[in-house]
Image (cartoon, helix red, strand yellow):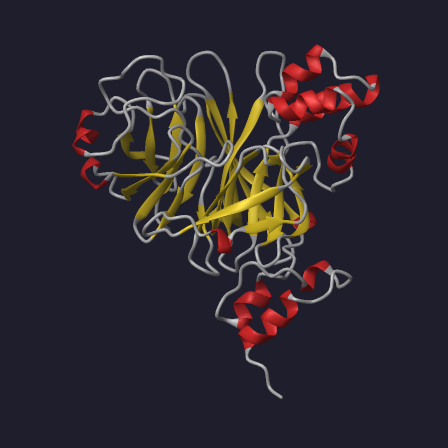
Amino acid sequence: MHLSYRRQLSKIKESPEGEGISYRAFECTSDSLKQTMRAMDSPDPKSWSVSSEYKDANFHESSQGVAHDGRYWYFTANGNKGRQGVFKYTTSMKLVKSLKLTDNMKLMRIDNIPFGGPHDYKPYKYPKFHHVGDPECYKDQIFLPMQGPHGFLTVHTSLDPSTVEWHPTPNIGDSHPWCAINPLNGMLYTSDFTGEDVNKGKYELILFAYHPETFDRAPDKDIRLQTPTFRVQGGCFSPDGILFLTSDAKIFKIALKTYTTEKVMTDASKQILENFMSKEMIERLSMGDHLDNIEQVRTSGIPLDPCITCYSPINGHFFGSIPIMREISLNSDQEVEGITYWERKERGKKTRLHVVLLENELGTDEVFFKHYSDSSK
């Protein structure tokens, strides 16, 4: 008896627990069998390396991420004193246009625009957001994930203030650090920044699905990653549907090393872990509970160093990671931020992945824009 493609997938999803992880638990599929199969092919993480890098000592303060429309780059930043915004650049890194998000009176026409983030203690007379994350560009629209208030801002690639719309959504933990459209099903995805689930006592990471037209949650389209990434800063999908996430896990690595060595949760460890876990989870660890969580993190396969993690969105299978090399000095430390996928030439070499690193310093921050090539293609 011939089974339809959809029926075959449903049968696979119902397969026993003992079956291989690559053939079970299908969460996201395409109507195209060919496209679905491509999304299950490993991107061969070991073959990726930096082929070129752009540095700018006078870039935007607190740069957070990058997207593209096939012609221009779009960077986001969380600068102080009203300098939070979106910045449009040519491929030769010339600024074309910018759109200020905070203190922009032109946005006051939006009926539901917020006038203050979660950390404000008094009313604010102009539109104000707490944190803009790693963006996505899709069909002439830029999607901006907002962490406080939680939701998505959209704006036309022209960066015309009249095209800005605010779509508030309920927060799920510390969600919305990034967003990206999945080419397999056309849904908009984001995740929690840290990913732990205090109620279950198990560290995991789930991609939260939204309809990109209505911004309604679509939990039936959520994707559970089989191996979680820590401290997710950015994310993107390749045209074949492979998911790439950037991880900035160095803070947790320090705390984990302290905890593993001393076998106790010191005050210093607690302070560091506050940037990674909820206070409830830290307290439970400090009392000696859920030690298996520490072991899970240590043996998960995700490096506790800055890296790009690679997944199949079909079933959340972890393919491996690509290291992100950083320049470290006594005065500054590079922080991994957003990522985007764009096949193009950088200094004569074909590149595909493009990652933003931020060097936090006093004054204007320096940016490092790394371009990655895949030697297997």
Q: Which residue is at a point 68% across and 64% down the rendered structure image?
A: 23
Q: Is residue 61 above or below residue 159?
A: above
Describe residue 22's horizontal placement relative to residue 18 as left or right.
left
Asked where in the image residue 300 lies, by quadrant, the reply is: top right
- Name the one closer to the observer, 111 or 188: 111
- Residue found farthest to the front: 199
Residue 349 in view in this figure: no
Q: Is residue 366 above or below residue 1?
A: above
- Residue found farthest to the bottom: 1
- Indicate the position of residue 344 as horizontal and vertical percent values: 46, 51
Q: Which residue is at a point 36% across and 23% down the rendered structure image?
A: 117
Q: Which residue is at a point 56% across and 51% down the rendered structure image?
A: 223
Q: Is residue 25 above or below residue 80?
A: below
- Name the one closer to the observer, 238 or 9: 9
Describe residue 186's horizontal placement relative to residue 36 as left or right.
left
Task: Count numbered badges in the picture.
Answer: 0
Asked where in the image residue 307 lies, by quadrant, the reply is: top right
- Name the one closer to the observer, 166 or 66: 166
Describe residue 207's horizontal placement relative to residue 155 as left or right.
right
Residue 41 in view in this figure: yes
- Name the one closer to the observer, 177 or 124: 124
Q: Which residue is at a point 70% across and 32% down the rendered structure image?
A: 304
Describe residue 94's horizontal placement relative to residue 147 as left or right.
left
- Indicate the position of residue 278 as horizontal and vertical percent values: 60, 25
- Locate the C terminus by quadrant: bottom right
- Indicate the position of residue 200 as horizontal and vertical percent values: 65, 38
- Locate the N terminus by quadrant: bottom right
Asked where in the image residue 114 lies, by quadrant, the reply is: top left
- Indicate the position of residue 16 as horizontal and vertical percent values: 73, 65
Q: Is residue 37 above or below residue 108?
A: below
